[in-house]
Structures are given as C-alpha cells and as structure tokens.
Amino acid sequence: MTTSHQPQDRYKAVWLIFFMLGLGTLLPWNFFMTATLYFTDRLDKSQNVSLVTAMLDIHASAAPTMLSPERGYLSAIFNNVMTLCAMLPLLLFTCLNSFLHQRIPQSIRILGSLMAILLVFMVTAILVKVKMDALPFFVITMIKIMLINSFGAILQGSLFGLAGLLPASYTTPIMSGQGLAGFFASIAMICAITSGSELSESAFGYFITACAVIVLTIICYLGLPRLEFYRYYQQLKIEGSGEQETKLDLISKGEMPRAGKEEPGIPAPNSQSTATIPSIKAILKNISVLAFSVCFIFTITIGIFPAVTSEVKSSIGDNSAWGSYFIPVSCFLIFNIFDWLGRSLTAIVTWPGKDSHWLLSLVVARLVFVPLLLLCNVKPRRYLPVVFEHDAWFILFMAAFAFSNGYLASLCMCFGPRKVKPAEAETAGAIMAFFLCLGLALGAVFSFLLRAIV
C-alpha cells in the first residue's frame, strides 16, 4: 500500500461532523444574542415589580423618588455589559488555550466545554420560568455570558487546532457551520416577529433548541474516533511522520504504530524534536501574515456590524410591514447568508494562495466598506451626510461586506495550519483562533468610535 492509498472520508462523514461541530460552537451563543430583547424586557418588568413592592413596604415619600432612577438602568446598560462580559473571557481563554492545549487532553477540552455550555443553557431555559428580581437576574445572566464565552473560546480554539491536523479543506466545514449558525438565528428572529409570540416563549424556544444542538454536537464528536480517516490523521500527529503503509494497516487494526521512515515531502523529525513542544514564537513567525489578516478582517467586521448597520433605517418602508422586517432581513439575514456563502466557497476555490500578496491586499481593501456603510441611512446621525439613502444600496453593500468577510476569513483559517510542520498544525490552529477572537474584541472597541463619528 502506498501513500496514494490513504483512507477516504467515506460518505463525507468527518467533513459533516466538523460542520456540525462548527454549527454547535456558535449556534447556542447566536440564539442567546437573539434573545436580547427578552433579557432587557424582563429586567424592566422585574424592576417594576421591585418598585411596586418597595412602595407597599416603605411608606416614606422619599423611597419612590430614590427608586425611580433605577428603573430601566440595568436594561439600558445590558448590551454594553454583555459585550464586555463576552469579549474579555473569549479573548483570555482563547489565549490560554493557545498555550495550554498541549497539556490538557483534547477530549477533555472539547467534551468538557460542550458539557459546561449545555449545563449553562439548561439553567437559562429553567430560569425563563422562574421569577427573580432585576439585580440578581442581571448578575446571573452576566455570569452565564462569561461562562458561555469562556468555554466557547476553549471549544473554538480546540476545534481549529483539531482541524489543523487534517487536510486544509477540513477547516472549511467549521467556518461554514459557524456561518450557518448566524443564518438560523436570523430566521428564528424573523419567525418570532411574524408569529407575534411572547418574548419569554420565543426565548425558551431558543434555549431549548440550543440544548438540543449541543447534545447532537457531543454525539457527533464522540463518533469521530470510530472513523478510520480521522484516526489516520490523528496518528500522523503522534508520529510526526512515518511509513504510510505500515501505519495504515496498524490503524485499521486499532493498533498504535511506531514512528517510521521519512514520508515523501515531509521531513522526519529526530527523537529529540518529537518530544519537544513546538515553539509558539517560531510558529507565530510563520503564520504572522495570516494571523494579522484574520484579526484585521474581524476588527473591521465587528467594528461596523451590528453596531452601525443595525441603526440603518429604511427609506421606503416607514408606513409598511417592510419597516419592521428591514433590519432583521437586510442587516442580519443578508449578512449571515452571504457570510455563509463566502465561508463555504473555500471548499471549492482557494484563491489567492497562502503565500500570495493578493490575500493581504484584499484583506486591507475591506476598509472601503467602512465609509460606504457609514454613509448609508444610519439614524440618528450628527456629523456625516447620507449619501446612499435607498435601501438597495445598503443591501448591496451588506452582501459584499459579508461575502468578503466569510471568504477571506475562511481562507486565512484554512491556510494557517498549512504554513507549519504537521506536528505544529494543532498549535497553529489554536493561535489562529486566538487572533480571530482578538479581532472580535478589537472590533467591539472600534465599534464605539465608528458609531460616534456618524
């Protein structure tokens, strides 16, 4: 048997599992954000209940005066505090995962994170039916947000590291699954508006659906070691290199082969280098351009979406149903559809290549979307004029903006592990995930500036 007789991914089973893992990584958090109106509405109602109780218990006239300013305060700061509680743990734990993933087994990181996120969403679904005062509810919600994003960071970094061990095309299903997660959340938002259901009922549905998706994701991950194609590339990591013929035979028997001779095109490491932990600094040097690119891509994207784009008003739907659906459709649905298309296209086309100067040029060129979207019909505005008032301009810009985000980000994440040796691919994938999260955090900070200059 030769290297050309490597095991095949039968029925694309591994590809589909990685797609499901990508979907399971972001769908729960997307549903959590979709339920933001539920959280703010409940905070307002809880504060109103607390105020009434205080007025009954305290007969001093000064008491209502002191409580009135508190009404709506927690709901008013909810989005800002949520962003802070989401981004800081996301960045911190992605960074920790880049350094500690070699010391903590992969299965513990992935399964432990999925189980923790499942537990948080089960508690969240239960609390929908439990009455609470505003302040405890606010604090518990923020703790849940920190936990979701902490374990989500470990999960995402571990998945990209895991995909780095397989052929380059296996990072694409993770990116594609993550893109589709946003699409499902957008559809759920539109369906909730159409049905006119209570916010609490919609939120409960989101959280239960998230629990079901996480359970399915756990089942998919547990099925990976049973697939010969996956075991083959896992063994490449353990060996660093080896004789493909003997290795494949042993893997198919479920045995552990020893490191063998040099594989064509891959230098065989000596015994010392096999035992040595890959150098973070050396890996970062090799993938620095790609790491900067993916960070820059998401800084621009999160800097303007959704902080600015969700404030665009329809110029033709003021007195029609289109006005209610304008942002859910033209902002969120359009973005998620074209972002998913861009991510998925990398399974077919990978231009420009990982060493091409065009890649960095296209990444930087996305800066043009900042003025284009700022000059759309964003309301309220104080400084910039409206140049592109019609809805069609905004939809066109959003489609191109989202497609370029998905395609270029997916390319960078696919190319990162390919720029290093096979034994360093998992570390490279984890580092790329860190820079992706760094871009998200920088974009969240950048969004305040962009919104202020409109």
Image (cartoon, helix red, strand yellow):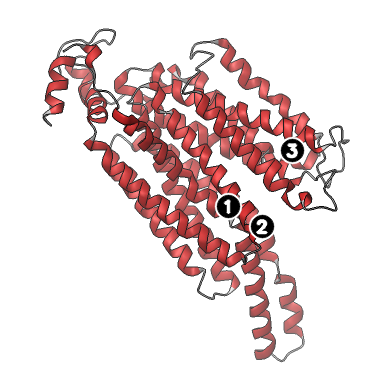
Separation (CA) of disc 1 from disc 2: 9 Å
Looking at the image, which residue is at 87% across and 43% down?
Answer: 382
45 displayed left or right of 218: right
- Amino acid marked by disc 3: Leu
Q: Residues within 10 Å of mark 2 (few under 14, many from 20)?
A: some
Q: Earlier in the sequence, mark 1 or mark 2?
A: 1
Dot 2 corresponds to which residue?
193
Q: Earlier in the sequence, mark 3 or mark 2?
A: 2
Q: Where residue 118 sits in the image (x, y, percent)?
A: 39, 55
Q: Can I make out residue 166 in this image?
A: yes
385 displayed left or right of 194: right
Separation (CA) of disc 3 from disc 2: 29 Å
Q: Residues within 10 Å of mark 1 (few under 14, many from 20)?
A: some
Q: Quadrant of the C terminus?
A: top right
Dot 1 corresponds to which residue?
188
> Which residue is at the front of the view, 337 or 357?
337
Q: Quadrant of the N terminus?
A: top left
Looking at the image, which residue is at 24% across and 22% down?
Answer: 7
Residue 450, labelled with which disc?
3
The reply to whether dot 1 and dot 3 touch (C-beta < 8 Å) is no
Q: Where residue 124 sits in the image (x, y, percent)?
A: 48, 63
Looking at the image, which residue is at 32% across and 30% down?
Answer: 11
Q: Where residue 246 sits in the image (x, y, percent)?
A: 12, 17
Q: Residues within 10 Å of mark 3 (few under 14, many from 20)?
A: some
SS label for mark 2 = helix
- Amino acid marked by disc 1: Ala
245 displayed left or right of 377: left
